[in-house]
Image: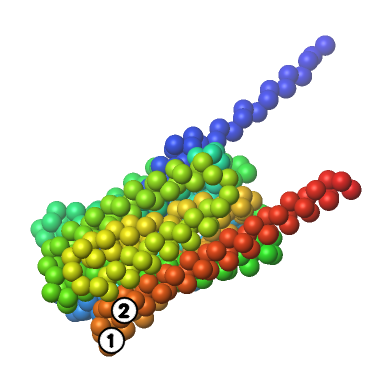
Amino acid sequence: MNKTSITPEPATAQPHPVRASAGAVVTTVACVLPVFLLGGLAVQMGTDLGFSPAGLGLAVSVYFGVSALASVPSGRLVERYGPPLVARCGILLAAGSMLAVAAFARSYPVLVGLLALSAAANALGQLASNAALAQHVPARRQGLSFGVKQAAIPVSTLLAGVAVPTVALTAGWRWAFVAAAVAALTALAAVPRQLPGMARRAGATGAGRATAALMVIGAAATLASGAANSLGTFLVDSAAARGLSPGLAGLTLTLGSAVCVAARVGTGWLADRRDTGHVAIIAAMLLVGAVGLGLLALTGSVPLVVGVVLGFGLGWAWPGLMNFAVVRLHPQSPATATSITQTGVYAGGCLGPLSLGPLAAHFGYPAMWTIAAVAMLLAAAFMLVGSRLLTRATTGRGVDQLVRSAM
């Protein structure tokens, strides 16, 4: 009698949480590298292609505007095809766009067009990373993981800064883009391989009321992002206009960036020790950040230092906590949910410089910092409203589940 031996299929090994986190960080850095590289090489590129600081600001605004438009479609692609595939596509698109800039950017319009192409890679990489963390990192450590991922974005600024003396000033800025493209391609090895079941059904969304809450939080993110981005864009020039040393302003901005990185990681670590109230904490951070921006309207070095630390260190430390809070409340569709709020972040990055720059030119920097502080206050109010809407939506889903289980 022949016995049919049934050999069970080996269980599909899921990526280790540490590797999943590392892959998310590397993907995020690689996909956002083109815009930071442009900022780091702006002097050399502006001389060669004939654009001014105003042209640089317009190019960056276009980049974030396209990122905002691509965010929701990218979230749907992640839900349908899975984070690993979309992450690889984002990395390849970012690397390809940087190679194209090196080879074909012979005029300012061509540069802007290629930068807009790379913005789609930013949206793909960011949302693929969010979904990967939601799928492979235990819930008790997701806050820290999202904090580390968002804190890693300044690494792109660091890489862009290193590229100036090492490559741009020796071999030329085009070779710096080539080197950055090669570095981005090495990130492919860090992306976990695609496993069965990673792709989700297309069109997965949260409950209706939760979607309304996400829209409110997205509006808050637009206001907060636009206000916070003004620090990196206008701080040094604002300090010089007030008679302060540009060196002091630069060092203060570096200090604010360091506090921001520490705050992103720290708030993520603390978020893992709380079950609720994460969006309300973001509102409190924005309130403190608004105070910091308001201080920048005052004269003197002390308001400058304190204002930057509060405004940039805390007023710009919330994106990781926001992604964590949204993913935690929408575990079945993390990419779709965060694509809505991420659209707000990108929209702020686009609209902030376009609106605050002319305001400073016509009415002065004190007026601009005051308006930025008011915008961040409004963002805090919207975050509180969004927090209540999310709580109601979560409670409603819980009641619905109890009713269905009792039937």
* Left or right of 157 on screen, residue 384: right
- Residue at horizontal 51%, vertical 42%? 272
Taking the view exactly as shown, the residue that stands out farthest to the left is 170
Quadrant position of the N terminus in the picture: top right
Answer with left or right where residue 224 lies relative to residue 358: right
* As drawn, 238 above or below 123: below
The residue under label 1 is 363
Q: Are marks 1 and 2 in contact (CB under 8 Å)?
A: yes
Q: Nearer the viewer, residue 85 or 258?
A: 258
SS at circle 2: helix
Q: Position of residue 81 (x, y in %)?
A: 57, 53
Q: Secondary structure at mark 1?
A: helix
Q: Position of residue 131 (x, y in %)?
A: 53, 50
Q: Is residue 68 visible?
A: no
Separation of marks 1 and 2 at Cα, in angstroms: 7 Å
Where residue 334 appears, as percent x and y from the top left, is 57, 54
> Pointer 2: what residue?
368
Residue depicted at 40% across the width and 46% down the height? 266
- Looking at the rendering, which quadrant does residue 135 occupy? top right
What residue is drawn where x is 69% and y is 65%? 208
Instruction: Name the amino acid, label 1.
Output: Phe
Residue under the image location 10 percent in, 58 percent down: 170
Q: Dot 2: within a 10 Å radius of its alpha carbon, few (fewer than 14), some, or many (20 or more) residues?
A: many
Instruction: Residue type at mark 2: give it.
Output: Met
Residue 389 against residue 48 in the figure, above or below = above
Left or right of 363? Residue 122 is right
Name the one closer to the observer, 338 or 192: 338
* Picture coordinates of residue 140, whole percent (x, y): 54, 39
Earlier in the chain: of badge 1 and badge 2, it is 1
Asked if residue 339 can be seen in this view, the reply is: yes
Q: Depth check: give the residue in front, 137 or 87.
A: 137
